Image: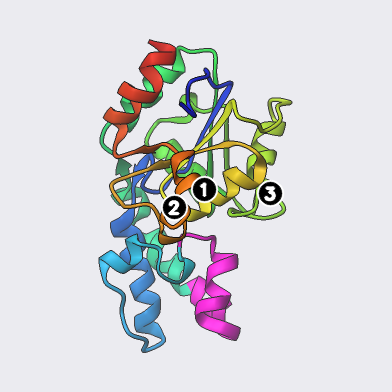
Amino acid sequence: MPYANRPSAILFDWDNTLADTWPIIYQSLNRVFEHFDMPLWSFEEVKAGKNGIHQSLRHSFPRLFGERWEEAKQVYYDAFLAVHLQAVKPLEGAKETLEMLKVQDVFVGVVSNKTGKHLRSEVKHLGWEDYFDVVVGALDAEDDKPSPAPIHFALKTANMEAGPKVWMVGDSTTDLEAALAAGALPHFFGDAEFPADYRADARALADIPHWKDHAEFRRQALLPLFG
């Protein structure tokens, strides 16, 4: 099995891997579309990562809004910052996963495409600072996921290098691509199907574990190694 060896590091995405944030992202993004008189997206389109929205703002907004992307970014953050700390909540089972790992000899971090200062404010708001050895967000490294740069940046704090004993757990293509580019082991998380390009590659699909939720992740991936 691709997860048969005990990992030395487990890096998690944040949004909708550890924290339930889809409603915040959906509301804030559609506020931008309203501002520009553009068609609104459905909740399903946002969750599916339409037009690469799972990427960081510095990657996705220029593609979506062209030369006015900085204006779009400000509108987004005005909407986002008004609600994100009140609305962010743990994904079901996430705290139990982190509690389990806290007592193990494993490096645990967050590597997210959420802007670093806002990411860390959410981690602090949930009282989760002690669960992580490092928290890396967008703009912290020289590039953001799907680049491997933030994974390398996170591991550098522990003088570690990426390899098969480094897991990157996340819910989007950007997480899979970043892990593969870094040489880490990707773990696809959540109730969505694998992205179409991965489903088309049967060999790649077979090498990537897919966990529907934290209960399954703990039971099948962590307990055999840390139980």
Q: Amino acid at mark 2?
A: Ser
The residue located at (54%, 65%) in the rendering is 57
Q: Residue at x 59, y 25 (%)?
A: 165
Classify 171 as above or below 42. above
The secondary structure that most of the magenta stretch takes on is helix
Q: Residue flagged by tag 1: what amino acid is it?
A: Leu
Residue 141 — which label? 3
Do the numbered discs 2 and 3 sit on residues whose CB atoms are within 8 Å? no
Q: Looking at the rendering, which quadrant does residue 68 occupy?
A: bottom right
CA gap, disc 2 and disc 3: 19 Å
The residue that appears at 67% across and 33% down in the rendered structure is 162
Q: Quadrant of residue 47?
A: bottom left
Q: Amino acid at mark 3?
A: Ala
What percent of the width, then of the height, locates residue 184? 60, 36
Quick check: marks 1 and 3 in contact, CB under 8 Å?
Answer: no
Q: Residue at x 60, y 66 (%)?
A: 58
Tell me if I can see residue 187 in this picture.
Answer: no
* Residue denoted by label 2: 172
> Magenta part of the protein: which range?
54-74
Disc 1 on helix, strand or loop?
helix
SS of the residue at dot 2? loop
Which quadrant of the structure image shows residue 99? top left
Is residue 155 found left or right of 28 in the rendered image?
Answer: right
The answer to whether residue 63 is magenta is yes
* Horizontal side of residue 114 vs 16, given as left or right: right
Write down the residue under mark 1.
176
**Label 1 Cα crowd, 10 Å radius (few <14 / some 14-19 / many 20+):** many
Q: Residue 181: percent from the left, percent from the top?
A: 65, 47
